[in-house]
Amino acid sequence: MSQLVSRALFDQVMVPNYNPQQFIPVRGHNSRVWDQQDKEYIDFAGGIAVSALGHTHPSLITALKNQAEKLWHLSNTCTNEPALRLALKLCNASFAEKIFFCNSGAEANEAAFKLARKYAYDNFGEHKHEIIAFEQAFHGRTLFTVSVGGQPKYRKGFEPVPAGISHVPFNDIEALKAAISEKTCAVVMEPIQGEGGIIPAKPGFLEQVRALCDQHNALLVLDEIQTGVGRTGKLYAYMHSNIEPDILTSAKALGGGFPIAAMLTTDKCAQSFGFGTHGSTYGGNPLACAVAEALLDEVNQPELLELVTQKSQLFFAELEKINQKHHIFKALRGKGLLIGAELIEPWHGKAAKFLAQAKDQGLMMLVAGPNVLRFAPSLIIPDEDIKLGMQRLEQAIDQLIKIGPENC
Ligand SMILES: *Cc1c(COP(=O)(O)O)cnc(C)c1O
């Protein structure tokens, strides 16, 4: 059967909004993946910062199997035990006092932006509806989230988009100061811009944004869809600072590969999502929540989070080593196991070429825009897999340098 399924079939039967790699993975274990031909890959991509515990983690399999034999779905006309246990654990582990579950990052952001508007409407009036976000930000692909996102290319052709949204340069507090007003209901930011090129907020920036929000009665919405669930070495990246958001969105790694997302907020804000104001059929699905609960139990442990920081150091050291030999990276950025390597100028625009070469060498990785290689592996990737993956990356780089930027 598997032989009938090839990459060519994608072009035949799938909407062409993706351009997947030429190989088709069929199984995975920890940080390794095998394709239809049984070729092995080291996984530095982690399904785009999703597979926080790698592939086929026993705790997640057990949680999924146990729940699969009990109860799959009820809808929100009933609540369920896994959803309530997970919500309690998220509250205990963070600033949050109330949780809303949904199925994807974009939906969590959609809920967050709607809540920010509704909260301002309830407490201050209709005029306070403006959302300020940052250039290059990525918040998802629904119409509202591409509108809040700071990459115009994702909005092009889909206009008219929702009104009352503006963008200012990231890490520029003066620009935000000039833009924010009594009409602002929320400022939305990623602690580290992910899709935008792995750009961390400057030290102190998050605190400055929080202070401006407080001055103008605006909510601070943190999009931690990529940075959350242990990725940066803390459960959520805001925990590296001494501020708290009003709303935080979490998805990607939350289910470790099972679709689930959450919006975390305070008691005070949650009041504006009263009965009947918002909803999702699958949100809080028992299977998804059971898996996420097991994942959170594993990830939210001091030992595991400390390990992320250690593995991060090894990752950066290995990338430095490659760079000393090949001088291909202009900058290495990121935190924990969310790492970006910006290519030097001659290679700008060519990041995607590295994916195909890496594939040939048996390595899965990511890009963040046209100039940056991105790494978001499992938080428990074995050190030996980091080293082996880096050997393969170096071989791929070697090949590309031989071809030269002008020829590829
Ligand atoms: C991936 C991502 C999203 C969108 O999540 P989906 O699950 O694809 O809808 C939103 N914000 C950030 C920061 C992301 O990295």
Image (cartoon, grey):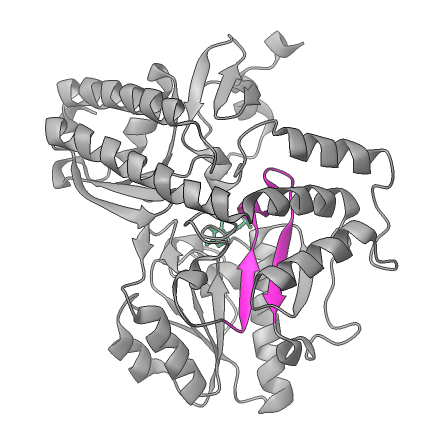
Q: Taking 214 as reference, is 268 left or right?
A: right
Pick whichever, 48 or 278, lies toward us.
48
Q: Taking 402 as reference, is 386 left or right?
A: right
Q: Position of residue 146 (x, y in %)?
A: 48, 59
Does residue 59 appear in this view? yes
Q: How many marks?
A: 0
Quarter of the rendering occupied by the N terminus: top right
Residue 134 is covered by the magenta coloring? no
Pick whichever, 203 or 331, lies toward us.
203
In the image, residue 35 sits, relative to residue 221, either above or below, namely above
Give the residue drawn at x 38%, y 82%. 211
Among the 4 quarters of the image, the one containing residue 2: top right
Q: Taking 299 as reference, is 194 left or right?
A: left
For this orientation, the residue located farthest to the front is 303
Q: Position of residue 275 (x, y in %)?
A: 79, 74
Q: Position of residue 56 (x, y in %)?
A: 61, 26
Give the residue drawn at x 86%, y 50%. 74
Q: Position of residue 81 (x, y in %)?
A: 82, 52
Quarter of the rendering occupied by the C terminus: top left
Does residue 371 appear in this view? no
Q: Taking 49 as reference, is 28 left or right?
A: right
Among the 4 quarters of the image, the one containing residue 337: top left
In the image, residue 309 sits, relative to residue 37, either above or below, namely below
Give the residue drawn at x 46%, y 87%. 183
Give the residue drawn at x 48%, y 34%. 380
In the image, residue 269 sits, relative to residue 364, either above or below, namely below
In the image, residue 140 sits, relative to residue 327, either above or below, namely below
Q: Which residues are magenta?
A: 245-265
